[in-house]
Structure formats: C-alpha cells, structure tokens
Amino acid sequence: MSKWMKQLKNMEGAVDKEYNPFAPENVLRTKSPSLNWIYGKGAGLPFGYSTILFGPPKSGKSLLSNLYVGNLHQTDKEAVAIKFNTEMREEGQTADYWGIDQDRYMAFNVNTPELVFDRIAGEITQMVQDGMPLKLLIIDSLQGMQGMREAAADSITNHQIGDHALMVQKGLKRILPLIRKHRIAFICTAHIRANLDAGMYGPKDKMAGSWAMKHFFEYFIEVKRDGSKEGKADELGNALEDADIKDFRGNKERVGHKIYVRMDDSSVGVAGRSGEFTLSYKDGLINTHEEVFLMAKNLGLVEQPNNRTYIFDGNSYSSKKDFLTALKDSPEMQNKVIDLAYLRDKV
C-alpha cells in the first residue's frame, strides 16, 4: 500500500474494505426465520443500516420492533436499545415474552423534533462516543411526530405545507452519521395512506412518507395482518382460538393470528420476498417450526417423491403432520433447514 493510500485510509469516513456488513455476526436478526429470510444476503438487518416497517393500523409494526429488541438482547448481553414511541403508548405495548432486558432498554414517549432527532444527535451521540453500547435505535412512528412549525405553533389552525416532510428530511440527515459510524441498526415504522394515483388496477394504498424517507432507508417491509382463513389457523388447520371461552354472540375467543411481511423494496438486498409468522396474544412469537416447514418445502430443501412423503437429512416422514412434528421436536433439525436457506444468499 502506497503512503498516499495509507493517509487516505486514516481519514475520517474512510471505508473499511475488509468489513462485510452481511456477515452473520454483523446483522440483527429476529426469532422469525421467514422475517430474516426476506432480507436476502445476510438474512437480517445489517448494523449501520435501516429498515422501515409500514402497513395499516394494528397490523403488527410495533410488535415487530419489539421482536428485534428482544432477540438483540438475547444474542448480545451488553447491547443497549432505545425507542422513541411518538404515539406515546409504550406502557401498553411491552410484554415479558419478547425477551427484552429492561435494564438495557429505554423508551421515550415524546413526539417533538427536539426530543427525538436533537436528542439523538446531541445527548445520545455523546453517550455513544463515551462508550454506551447502543446497537438498536427505533422511532415508532415517523407520522406520530410533529413538524417543526407545528410543534412551535400556538394554534392547530396554523398549517404549514411541507412542514412534516422537511422535519423528517432534516432529522434523518442529522442522525445518519451516528448510525453509520457506530454501526447502529435503525428501525422506523410508518403509516399508510390512500393511493389516489392507483387507477383501476393499481394498489389502493401506499406508504405515507416523503421522498426523503424513500431515499434514506435501505429496506422497506410491508406488514399486514393475515385475515384469510389460513391466517387464523396453524399449518394443520387448527384454529387459533380458545374453544372454552366465547363472547356474548357465541364466538370463540381468538388467541392469535398470523402476520404477513413482504420486502417491498431494498437498495442493498432482494425485493419481493414474503414471509409469515404467528403471533400468540399470550406467548408472543409461536410456531416457528411452521415457518421452517414452509421454508424447506418452498425452497426445495426437502425431497417430496409424492404428495405425502417428506425426506430430509436421510430421514423419511410419511405425512405433513409427521414432518411438522419432527421439526417442532428438534431445534437442531430446524437450524439445519434455516442454515441451508440462509446459505443460498451468503456473500
């Protein structure tokens, strides 16, 4: 290496050519195999990059952010996570089953620019420079924030066109150096709005956000509640209901549902992949063996000589139920399937 290249390498912002952001140790994953898989190479969100989760109300966007926090704390015993809950409902959205270490997680119920973006760029950046092991930063949601002039106005009748979009653009630009330099995973949630330009055949809704948001984020994940018949039952057709509890119209109480996720777009990975996981209202993420089953089947990782038989790793299973049961009873078997699936995208 020439002396000139050595000098350039020591300058602020010089890129480390040996660093692989998609290596397993450099990505943030969840306990949902299919959610990880839709990222493509790396099978997760690389630290220092950003994901935006968007979808209709009550689709599961906030739950997904908790899923990321929980797995971060389970895999990194020092990592700190911070969330800005701009919709100010943090107390009602936390649960023990996510695996979040409350000693390494701080949430703020705030929605003004100075208490979100200025705080990140100021006090939090200083704490990171002083050694705080911050690995995940969340804003839930961007639409829950007030614009700059909106926050300072004396009356709601003082409207400022473009106020919110400009605030988001300036705020994201201001915190980007912290995220990149210190390799902090960044997750935001966003609402949707009617797509008035869809025409007769186009999508009826789209992510609510400015062009600055679309340029900033690397991964765009659509989140929806699966309202289909299959979305209300497990892979063997058992309804996600409690037959012993009924409402005043005789309807069985629902105990969970499936959440559909789709990588709508990405500037560093694949686009169009979809996954689905099951949420239990009591236990959180459940039935991950069903995700692994579909992964094995849809990616051709299991042999199917006929419509009943499944052959994997030298063992034969005479029915879908038998294969699902084997996966459920063997975490090692699940990991073999997951490793094979992720290996296809390895870089």
Image: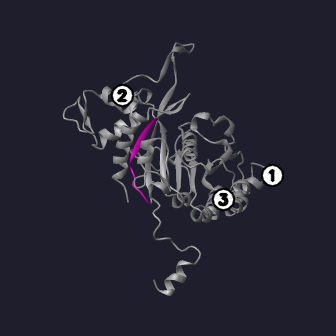
Numbered disc 3: secondary structure: helix
Q: Report whether 93 appears left or right of 261.
A: right
Which residue is farthest bottom?
A: 3
| In magenta segment, residue 276 | yes
* Residue type marked 1: Asp
Of labels 2 and 1, earlier in sequence is: 1
Q: Is residue 89 visible?
A: no
Is residue 254 positioned above or below 206 on the image? Answer: above
Q: Residue 325 has which mark?
A: 2
* Residue range corresponding to the magenta coloring: 268-277
Which residue is farthest right?
A: 154
Rendered image quadrant of residue 203: top left
Q: Are marks 3 and 2 in contact (CB under 8 Å)?
A: no
Is residue 174 positioned above or below 311 on the image? Answer: below
Disc nearest the viewer among 3 and 2: 2
Q: Measured from the top left, where is residue 307 in percent x and y?
A: 22, 30
Numbered disc 2: secondary structure: helix
Rendered image quadrant of residue 62: top right
* Residue type marked 3: Met
Disc nearest the viewer among 2 and 1: 2
Magenta: main secondary structure: loop
Around disc 1, counting alpha carbons within 10 Å, would you say few (fewer than 14), some (14 to 19), or many (20 or more)? Answer: few
Q: Report whether 261 appears left or right of 208.
A: left
Q: Residue at x 56, y 51 (%)?
A: 187
Q: Could you tell me which quadrant the C terminus lies in?
A: bottom left
Q: Is residue 120 visible?
A: yes
Q: Residue at x 64, y 64 (%)?
A: 174
Q: Residue 154 has which mark?
A: 1
Q: Residue 167 has which mark?
A: 3
| In magenta segment, residue 129 | no
Colour convention: one colour
Disc nearest the viewer among 1 and 3: 3
